[in-house]
Amino acid sequence: MSRHSMDLIKGTLDVLILKTVSWGPMHGYAISRWLRETTEDSFQVDEGALYPALRRLEKKGWLDSEWGLTDTRRQAKFYRLTRAGKQRLEQEVDLWSRYVEAMGRVLFHAGPAES
């Protein structure tokens, strides 16, 4: 079965970024690459969505950033999760867990009982 790229549901990019940088500081391209590889190309985040989201999360205080060198010795801005970002991620993971559980109950239910 071939895999196709899926559009992200509105509001999911933020939590995906927060989760990705929870593993340690990463620059934008590394975040995008990790998401693509981890989802086996299901989520491909383009620069036009990623960098505004990173700036938005930084403005909210959920990410901090600093300039550094990549593995290829290029200058890049590295993002890391703040304490507030960690709290927000925990809230989002809890919300998504409940959402997935509720969706599963509907999608995989045997159907309404006959009256």
Image (cartoon, rainbow, N blue to C red):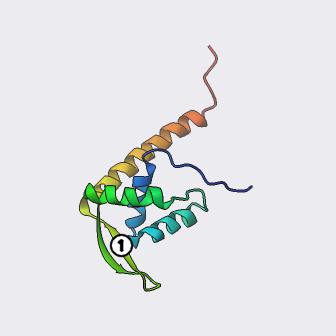
Q: Is residue 66 left or right of residue 101?
A: left
Give me the residue at 32% from left, 55% from top. 56
Q: At which x and y percent is residue 85?
A: 29, 58
Q: What residue is disc 1 on?
A: 78
Q: Amino acid at mark 1?
A: Phe
Closer to the camera in the image, 97 or 30 = 30
The quarter of the rendered structure image containing the N terminus is bottom right
Residue 14 locus on image (x, y percent) = 39, 54
Quarter of the image where the C terminus is located? top right
Q: Give the percent coordinates (x, y) of residue 107.
A: 59, 36
Rendering quarter of residue 50: bottom left
Q: Residues within 10 Å of mark 1 (few under 14, many from 20)?
A: many
x, y percentage for residue 38? 55, 64
Tell me the residue at 43%/68% (across/down): 28
Q: Residue furthest bottom?
A: 73
Q: Residue at x 51, y 63 (%)?
A: 35
- Dot 1: what SS? strand
Q: State whether residue 67 is above or below residue 41.
A: below
Is residue 76 shown to the viewer in this render? yes
